[in-house]
Amino acid sequence: MSCQTGIVASSGLAAYLSSVSHHSDRCIQINIENEELQLIQNRLAASDYESDWDRNVMVCIEDDQPCYIFYRLDDKANDGAYNYVFMCFVPNDSSVKNKMLYAATRATLRRIFGDNRISTEFMGTVPEELSLQGYKNQILSAGSAAPMTDAEKELAQVKKDEASMRSQMSSNSATLPGLQLPVTQDLQTNLEKFKKGFINYLQIKLDTDKEELKLWDCGNIKASEFPEKIPVEEPRYHLFNYQHDFEGESIWKIVFIYSCPGYSVPVKQRMMYSSTKSCFLDSLAKMDIDIAGKREISRETK
């Protein structure tokens, strides 16, 4: 079973979910580890769902570790199967890549588990939001909203998650206008040089460990030299101000190119580049760097 992000369910998790034994479990914790959905723990029901809640859910939560939790209620659906609450815990101080990874994989995990078995779904950033009282607050809040279709619910949840991630992805470092990830001073300086025409090529690397954008290469190159600049093992952003003739006139145009070798690149790295791209382009526009064309290329289209 695979997810849109490239994350797969481990063989152990797939076997567990396909068995009938998990129906007796009250609480199921699943984490993303080594680019797989892994079963971390499963806890048996001991009493009614309210009495079991905090002693089961709260032990799954670590301050700095995102996780998914499925919690079995006592009531059943029309087909006789138990209803579940699906929770996604993503702490405020999680890394940007983990925030995006857990948010992007969430919908697919829900489908793997079974959409029809989930009666309530919500996300928390602090442990208290996943407590029994936090769950009851979610129910009260949902009860005051107008009924929505399944598609409307999913769209609303996606927007909520995106808004939550944007509010959390802040930094005290100097940033480009509108860009959440910090940039090195070297990159900022060379963007200004590129804007003024002193250089016609920039290659930008997204450092996933430091969660910052930094300059990787720059200079003046010919169009024929550009293919040799594309890394074959890692993604990059490129800015190239190239010259061409049109009706006898020499014209300069700035092109933005996102190069990615393909699925040999780790999932988190692909997601970071893909999710940061639009913000980076918005920031370039605010710096009056006019992008005439955009292109995404892989190693095969190099």
Image: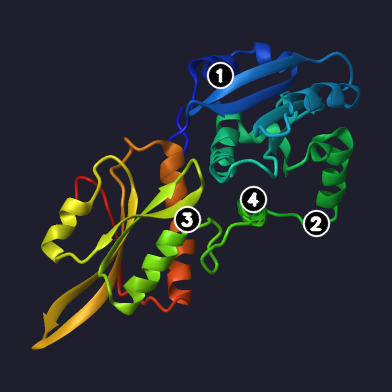
> Where is residue 86 drawn, in percent x and y?
70, 34
Please state if 300 lies on the left or on the right of 108 as rendered: left
Crowding at label 2, few (<14), some or many (≥20) Cα neighbours within 10 Å?
few
Which label belongs to residue 292? none
Query: Is residue 10 placed above or below 293 in the rendered structure?
Result: above
Residue marked by disc 1:
13
- Callout 2, which amino acid? Ala
Q: Which mark is residue 276?
A: 3
Q: Which of marks 3 and 4 is in front?
A: 3
Give the residue drawn at x 26%, y 70%.
199
Residue 222 appears in the rendering = yes
Q: In which quarter of the image is residue 160?
A: bottom right
Q: Residue 145 carries which label?
A: 2
SS at mark 3 in the image: helix
The mark lying in front, picked from 3 and 1, is 3
Q: What element carries label 4?
A: helix
